[in-house]
Amino acid sequence: MPPSPTPARATLVTSIASAWTDLGGGIRVRQSVAYAMNSVLLLHPEHAIVVDPGVLPSELDDLKHAVDEIHPAQVTLFLTHAHWDHVLGRPWWPKARIVAHDRFGAEVRRGRERTLSEAARVAAAHGEEWSAGFEPFVPHEPMSGMRFAKLGPWRVVWRDAFGHCDSQLNLHLPESRTLIAGDMLSDIEIPWLNRPPAAYRATLDALVPLAANGAIETLIPGHGAIARGAEAVRKRIGRDLEYLDALESGVADARREGLSLEQAQEKLGVVSLPVSDLGLMASVQRENVRLAWEAMTKN
């Protein structure tokens, strides 16, 4: 019988185990201690798909071990968008075929220095060292719009998912009724806009009929808890649509009252939804107000 683990080792093993969620059918999700970011593995000996692997070196090692255990004949690395915490995994799968948006390469190149600095900073904050470096890269299979594919046993649908990042795609698995949403539909963040609300709303509106008709019963956001069950998925989408309604309504009211942008940001700066980092989300809220304000100014 092997010796019992030391308390420290037992804690580590428990922590690693609790980071994983097995959704069945070869779909596993590992949540990082950094920003509760979700990495998704679609595991099958014929073909494994690795989605947004991150964030810490030890977590990437753990993800790689899970893939290596099944000895897949092929590995595809799908990166939902080009933000730093979603693009770190390539050194762990250097021979994998990379799928991403056709704007991905340019955004990764522009963000190289931030990716390196953030990876090092976050690793150090959790007692680790980032030694993998980071070099920009382009996907082997760039895409945009909507794309249907079959990778081994996996039937997949990629769709543009604009509103948070111009290089974002989501991934729908129709057979398991699962959506990998990228950095949208989190329960611990407000919608984080990079453009006026209309772009984000269009992405959500495209998901509404899928959720209403039962085509999505599991929703995996980039950060936060998985929504499981059709009703939970519909509520998650509805939550973000309601946020956008309130944002635009609040900005419209502020403009009618004759407030300046700065006054509107102050008035609307309270984040009413439950979030994990109130300070960060308050900053996001101010930027969202600015984007909604500028859209109304142009109209």
Image (cartoon, grey):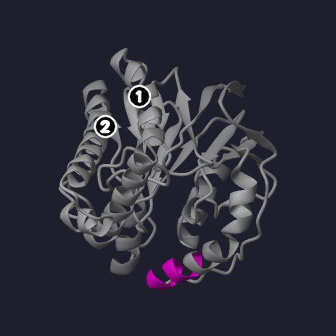
Percent position of residue 233, x then y: 32, 32
Quadrant in which the C terminus is drawn: top left
Could you tell me which residue is drawn at 25 percent across and 27 percent down? 231
Q: Quadrant of residue 240?
A: top left
Front residue (pair 249, 225): 249
Q: Which mark is residue 219?
A: none
Number of numbered discs on residues: 2
Could you tell me which residue is drawn at 37 percent across and 17 percent down? 214
**In this picture, residue 160 sits left or right of residue 76:** left
Residue bounds of the magenta highlight: 119-126
Which secondary structure is most common in the magenta stretch? helix
Front residue (pair 261, 136): 261
Percent position of residue 114, x then y: 61, 75
Q: CA distance from mark 2 to mark 1?
A: 8 Å
Give yes or no for contact between labels 2 and 1 (Cβ–Cβ under 8 Å). yes
**Mark 1 is on which residue type?**
Asp
Q: What is the secondary structure assignment of the residue under circle 1?
A: helix
Quadrant in which the N terminus is drawn: bottom left
Label 1, on which residue? 205
**Mark 2 is on which residue type?**
Leu
Residue 125 belongs to the span the image colors magenta: yes
Q: What is the secondary structure assignment of the residue under circle 2?
A: helix
- Closer to the chain start, of discs 2 and 1, is 1
